[in-house]
Image (cartoon, grey):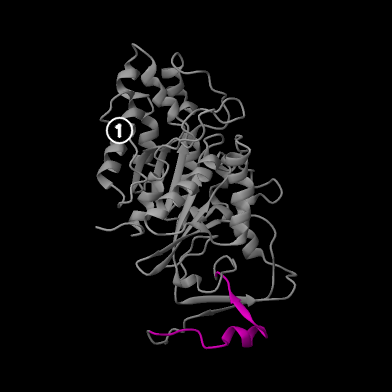
Amino acid sequence: MSKCPRCFVSLTPDHFAWTLVSGTATEADPIAGAFHGGQVLSRKIVKLRRPADAHAGWAPPPQYAELELGGPAREVCPTCHYVLVDGWRNAQVTCIAMAGARATGKTVYIAVLIKQLQLLGESFNAVVEPFDSTTEATYRDHYEAPLYEARGILEATPAAHTGNPYQRDPLIFSLGHWNNVSQILVIRDVAGEDLENPENARAPWLQFFTHADGVLFMFDPLKVEAVTNQLHDLLPSQERVGGDPRTVLRTVLGIVGLGTPNLAIILSKFDALQALQYVEGSEWSRIMSNPGAAFSRDFSLRPAPYHDGDGQLLNQEVRSLLKKLDATPMVMSVDQPHTGRPLANRYFAVSALGESPVGDRLHASGITPFRCLDPVRWVLATRGVWHWQ
């Protein structure tokens, strides 16, 4: 089923809405503004619901919208009034919400993820590309160029209150066709600063988390005090920026509420932990140098279905690592959330860059991603995309 790329609500055959194709948008739209997180001007909008006595094959009458609006019409989401492109309802849309405290690497992860998806898509004879000009410009200007051309560290995602931050618009990518259906991937990011504020749990502009197919919760293990205390003699000191990931996770689970997205708990910057294998004589050297561990290999670019067995093994290994790092409360927050509604979840370990940056520049070895595709491939597999038995 198709979904709106802004609010992530499913587009059912029972509810439709349209607006005029052309003309000046002069009317303040409080519904669109609430979901956008800022003022939105719209043209006139008309809506239509399936009549109670309609037959099973009911569809809106031909030219209904044009007659009501007095001109050419285009469809909008009946929930949030986001303008939909022609044929959007015919596509299968997989919606992913990114979450995490500040400085967890979400922006870098998205930049690298798209490049990895493009490589994987080639093996499936699929072209992964921006679906619209807005996505193309946003990805190029805020993700691709700063990282791959300027070779610098990307700026943090701007908070919602800072003017008109670019992440208010969803990133929409075409994944080509699978099972004779157009496949679309939508990614929405949120500033860590906004998720560190529990008062935002009921903000309308964050309710897309409730309807997401997957929530990718990223956290830097070195931002957990118990972890830092364990490793302070083995790793360089880290600049502490951003809030406790457990606080952010609590806020995210509160936003999800009664929703049922798949929850991916992602240890970001895993290269920092992998480096412990070179610390001679330490217990962590023995743990991290295990060649048989799932966290020591990367199958994510293989032109094959998502390897669920490998994913389950990695899940157990990462859970064990967290407990070894005295981060059991983090695991318990997932298993026994304060909402009382545990989500289907899986743990992952990723490194978008492969090596820690040097100051504000990339490491001389360049970008060597590790297992970046795993979380998204897991979510796509639950939707039957790039996956077969």
Determine which quarter of the picture holds residue 292.
top left
Q: Quadrant of the N terminus?
A: bottom left
Asked if residue 260 lies in the magenta stretch, the reply is no
Residue bearing the label numbered 1: 317
In percent of width and height, residue 237 lies at 53, 18
Q: Quadrant of the C terminus?
A: bottom left
Instruction: Determine whether the residue tagged by mark 1 lies in a helix, strand or loop.
Output: helix
Which residue is found at the position 69% from the left and 51% from the top? 164
Which stretch appears magenta? 57-77
Front in this rendered view, residue 387 or 347 = 387
Which residue is found at the position 34% from the left and 48% from the top? 344
Picture layout, residue 123 above or below residue 30: above
Picture layout, residue 205 above or below residue 199: below
Side of 330 relative to 358 (left or right): left
The number of callouts visible is 1
Residue 13 visible from this viewpoint: yes
